[in-house]
Amino acid sequence: MKILKLKTFMKLYKKELTTPLGNLIALASQGELFLLDFSDSKGLTAEIKQVINSSKGLLVQGESNLFPLLEEELSLYFQGDLQQFSIPLHLIGTDFQKRVWQELLKIPYGNYISYQEQAQRMGQPKAVRAVAGANGHNKIVILIPCHRVVGSNGTLTGYSSGLWRKQKLLEIEHISCDEKYRLCQKEILTKPASPIY
């Protein structure tokens, strides 16, 4: 008699969240956030498939207990009242990508660095393109702040959800840009001049 081994799947829940910059799609288990990206982001469908396959996940009906906290923290962030998220994250990518994303988490709110500086901080100063590429594969926008990395000349580059969103996220954090997506100055404010929410 042949005994079949049952496969176990990670239960993943999907939710669409409304924000001032457009809707976000979130995928989470009951304990960790796996994906957060804008619904019109290039490659979102492929990202969702990768998360499901890599985590041995199964999309199920229902809601993650993380979603209310995620919605609350995003709302506070967009109002300019939250600088540090507390949501547990589950990173899916290569070891190198995970190192790049961990480095992103070290960039404080209201600050930015260049891709060159990010590569140097990782001890790989010649890996600028690889670092930029890994930033582009970040599956958890806003919480893993790839929007805080800019070109070496201060120009906003490389944001799959649109440079206008990268600019708005930096403005929430009191960093202004001109109409050509060049960083201007850090504003000395305690809150954004005009809240988005």
Image: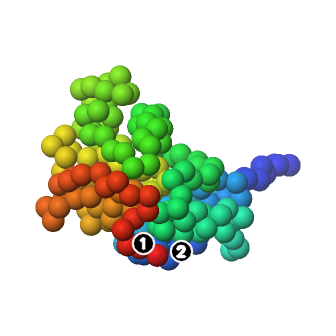
The residue tagged with tag 2: helix, strand or loop? strand
Q: Nearer the viewer, residue 180 or 6?
A: 180
The residue tagged with tag 1: helix, strand or loop? loop
Q: Identify the mark nearer the N-term, 1 or 2.
A: 2
For residue 187, say whether it is visible.
Answer: yes
Q: Is residue 38 above or below residue 127?
A: below
Q: What label sits on residue 16 in the rendered view?
A: 2
Q: Residue at x 29, y 61 (%)?
A: 167
Q: Nearer the viewer, residue 33 or 78?
A: 78
* Label 1 crowd bin: few (<14), some (14–19), many (20+), radius 10 Å: few
Q: Residue 109, how many percent across, how many down?
A: 44, 48
The residue furthest top is: 123
Q: Is residue 180 above or below residue 55?
A: below
Residue 181 position by quadrant? bottom left
Q: CA distance from mark 1 to mark 2?
A: 22 Å
For residue 47, say whether it is visible.
Answer: no
Residue corresponding to mark 1? 195
* Label 2 crowd bin: few (<14), some (14–19), many (20+), radius 10 Å: some
**Which of label 1 and label 2 is nearer to you?**
1
Q: Is residue 5 above or below residue 59?
A: above
Tag 2: residue type?
Glu
Q: What label sits on residue 43 in the rendered view?
A: none
Q: Residue at x 66, y 68 (%)?
A: 68
Q: Residue 196, how many percent across, how many down?
A: 41, 73
Q: Residue at x 53, y 46 (%)?
A: 91
Q: Is residue 70 left or right of residue 149?
A: right
Tag 1: residue type?
Pro
